[in-house]
Image: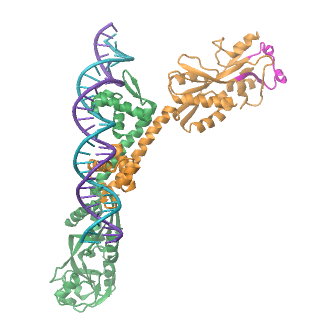
Chain colours: A orange, B green, C purple, D cyan
Amino acid sequence: MDLRRLRYFVAVAEERSVGRAAVRLRMAQPPLSVQIRKLESEVGTALFRRGARGMEPTAAGRALLSRAREALALTAEGFEAARAVAAGRRGRLSVGYMFALAHAVLPKLIPELRRSLPKVDLEFIELSASTREARLLDHSVTVALCMPAIRHNEIEASTIGTQRLMLALPASSSLARATAVPVKKLQGRPLISLPWPAEDPATSVVASLLRRHQVSMPVANRVETVHSALSLVLSGEGMAIVPACAQLGCPTGVVFRPFLDADDAIDVAVCWRRDSLNPLVRNFLKCAEKVIRQT
Amino acid sequence: MDLRRLRYFVAVAEERSVGRAAVRLRMAQPPLSVQIRKLESEVGTALFRRGARGMEPTAAGRALLSRAREALALTAEGFEAARAVAAGRRGRLSVGYMFALAHAVLPKLIPELRRSLPKVDLEFIELSASTREARLLDHSVTVALCMPAIRHNEIEASTIGTQRLMLALPASSSLARATAVPVKKLQGRPLISLPWPAEDPATSVVASLLRRHQVSMPVANRVETVHSALSLVLSGEGMAIVPACAQLGCPTGVVFRPFLDADDAIDVAVCWRRDSLNPLVRNFLKCAEKVIRQT
DNA sequence: TTTTGCTATACCGAAATCGTATGGGTCAGT
DNA sequence: ACTGACCCATACGATTTCGGTATAGCAAAA
């Protein structure tokens, strides 16, 4: 039960001649002849009818032929599949993303992924800030699109772009009349707070922005997603400081204003388990960088 | 690209250990280890992650594993299929039969064939006497059920049973009152003639029966099938001398009587091309003999 | 640190494979 | 009918590959 013999057998059956099959296989005729006979003795029946004009497969030979072709194709495909998986051109890639990035990056990222990694089985899962890290660690997502990057010693991150922070406020607000808002004007106004690391003031871009301008805003609400924050802004609960991309798909009635005297930005990053030797991660990163660059 | 390597690979992947796989394959561990590494270098990527606790297939290894299993199963199935075809347990068997035998043998023959040759693809074709020979010669049927056997130098025949000749006559006929009819009584009565070799009187059982009793019957009609003959008998066109099995499925109004002073019989035979080395023929013959014997 | 349990390497003998030379059979053309 | 052409089968020596034994290397458990 050797694949080489099956390859020889298929060649002989197709050429209907040992000699012609031998030249196709770049070998001499006698050894090919003995291999065919060995195969026949292994199977236990004649696979060819020998005539003076060449070899004709018997009914038993034809029965074997189709299966031998399939087996050969299957192993070749298996080798190729293994190489493709190893190169990250094939496999399953589960991407966790935040809702805030959905409108900004997914419409460009998904087509690019499908184009450059056509055999990869893609899955996109919207994850709230608090679950992204857990889902990465328990392997239920392969990579996560984060803003900002997750900080964890088992997780690695690569920044693929930045989003400028903007003030989201009701269209009816007096501050909305200006095209840009000085940070000082926020003093004392209620803030809809998002869960980017308020616990860690050193790294929180919003906290550091306010601190730098010596402005304090009472926290009116804490919400999980940018979308919820905008809802509350629309309800008049307060203002939110959000990445610029939140404008896309935002309900009408909420307007966005840049700061007159600050252009702080927040990192958009791809995060993955440090021990994930999955080559899909590299390829995903390449696609994501390409898409973000042209944004 | 060798099947042995794939078999080794599957064993190691399943056992998750070279050592255990080696005992399963009844070989020593080092050569198995070498073969796995050769496979990996042939594919071009690592297929296992080596740990102190054994071998764990990588994603690429798993991609190959399923296809390797399929390829192995396919070649095993190919070998088995070739053997089955060679032994006549598999393949296509096209059976030509005469309508006259349909009721008598098919209801028993077909279930027996399906039972003892379950993987054979059976086809039954009703053929008139004049086409059976041609369809055998052009390979469009593999075997033919004939009565009597076809005589042709390229066709071989095996008698599997006999059918007694009986007189088929209208129920209203005066001869029908007797339980058996003396041949002499047929003198001068019109005969519905069937196409068994009237051209070759030496071999025609009907002709020899009449000749032996010095009886002559004018030929009222020549018909192709026993069924047609019985129709004409029912119409009052004459009498027919037919095999006993014609009684089954015969229209009412026609009765059958044995001869008082003759018990001539006609052979039921299976015919096939002499050059047909198809083992299905042998198996078919065995089934047919078995069925006829118990009839 | 020692032990245990695994895989990887080295080397040798055995088996399988391949190539060259040659025999034997069938078919076509003279 | 004979001969030449063609194709498959066999024989044998050279090479490659494979499997077994002995042993090294390495990581986790005791």
In the displayed structure image, the side of residue A87 where residue A169 appears, left or right: right
Q: Which span is picked out in magenta?
A: A163-190
Relative vertical location of residue A221 with respect to residue B179 in this rendering, above or below = above
Quarter of the N terminus of chain A within the rendering: top left
In the displayed structure image, the side of residue A18 where residue A236 appears, left or right: right
In the displayed structure image, the side of residue B153 where residue A173 appears, left or right: right
Q: Nearer the viewer, residue B118 or A28?
A: A28
Figure disc tally: 0
* Residue A280: percent from left, percent from top: 53, 30
Q: Nearer the viewer, residue C26 or A226?
A: C26
Query: Residue A187: within the magenta?
Result: yes
* Residue B241: percent from left, percent from top: 25, 82
Query: Residue B71: within the magenta?
Result: no
Relative vertical location of residue A71 with respect to residue B49 in this rendering, above or below = below
* Residue A12: percent from left, percent from top: 36, 53
> Hey, which quadrant is residue A115 in on the image?
top right
* Residue A288: percent from left, percent from top: 62, 30
Quarter of the C terminus of chain A within the rendering: top right
> Hey, which quadrant is residue B233 in on the image?
bottom left
Q: Nearer the viewer, residue D9 or B135?
A: D9
Relative vertical location of residue B84 with respect to residue B45 in this rendering, above or below = below
- The answer to whether one can see residue B120 in this image is no
- The answer to whether one can see residue B280 in this image is yes
Residue lying furthest bottom? B188
